Amino acid sequence: MPKQLRYTSFKPGELEQRLREFAPQSAGTIPLTNGRGNGSLCKSHTFAVAFPDGKSGNCCYERKGPSWHEFRYSYADGAQMPKQVCSERMGSDFHAVERKGAELAKACYLEAIRAERENYFRRASEPSDGSRKRRPERYGMKAQRAKESAGLYALCRMWNGVLTPVGTLYEEIERANQAWRETGDMRLVVACCNRLDRCWEVPKYNTLYAEFAPCAEREKEETQS
């Protein structure tokens, strides 16, 4: 008959180790917390996720309550993305958390597209915190034209180092993406009008990048042609 454990204080991980030593073989493995929760309950967890553009990133999960779960995402370059909150009961193990995190990664990415449009492309003045400055060297249109087109999307081509719209302007990025697919012209890119800098600029976030991602080398070739 195994020796009884006395009530005492244990160092982190010591209790689990002692329990394994005295538990019968048929009892199975006793779950470890690893600092992330008690037993199989996942209270916090960091794991990799894939975004709709084919890029990867990280998700940091934190359990706030049975029906309150926060998922904080960072992009491939480390940029912070919109937080997602799940206000429903879900599995408490790590696999359930990762499944939900992967599911919410799409919603996070679509919200990042909207935030970029509203907070970056449609911005009319410099932020008070100094995080962004106006760049007059990029001006490619008059202020009124930039105001009217701010946050609109268009198919653009590089001319003399400047992106120039070709054809229709779109309110939604997916309509511009579909127009790009229909043209089949690899010289074109989907760009958005940047009001503060009065120019057309390729967005950071676009689901189209899973199929076609413009790069500096391609833009440089267009400039030289």
Image (cartoon, rainbow, N blue to C red):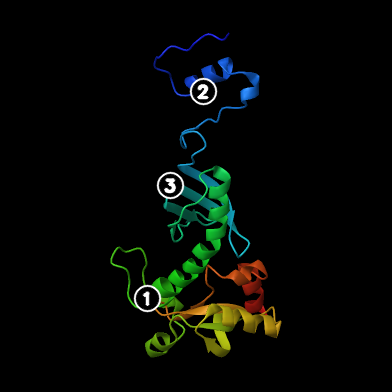
Q: Residue at 39% x, 86% y: name it.
A: 147
* Residue placed under numbered mark 3 in the picture: 63
Q: Residue 137's spot in the image, x, y percent? A: 43, 76
* Residue 213 place in picture, x, y as percent: 63, 69
Q: How crowded is mark 2: few (under 14 residues within 10 Å), some or many (20 or more)?
A: some
Quadrant assignment, res 124: bottom left
Where residue 132 sits, quadrant-wise, is: bottom left
Q: In this view, does 133 lie above or below 180?
A: above
Q: Callout 2, which amino acid? A: Glu
Which residue in the protein does label 1 denote?
A: 123
Q: Is mark 3 on a helix, strand or loop?
A: strand
Q: Disc 2 designates what residue?
A: 16
Relative placement, left or right, of 78 versus 143 is right
The amino acid marked with disc number 1 is Arg
Q: Which of 93 and 26 is in front in this view?
A: 26
Q: Is residue 214 in view?
A: no
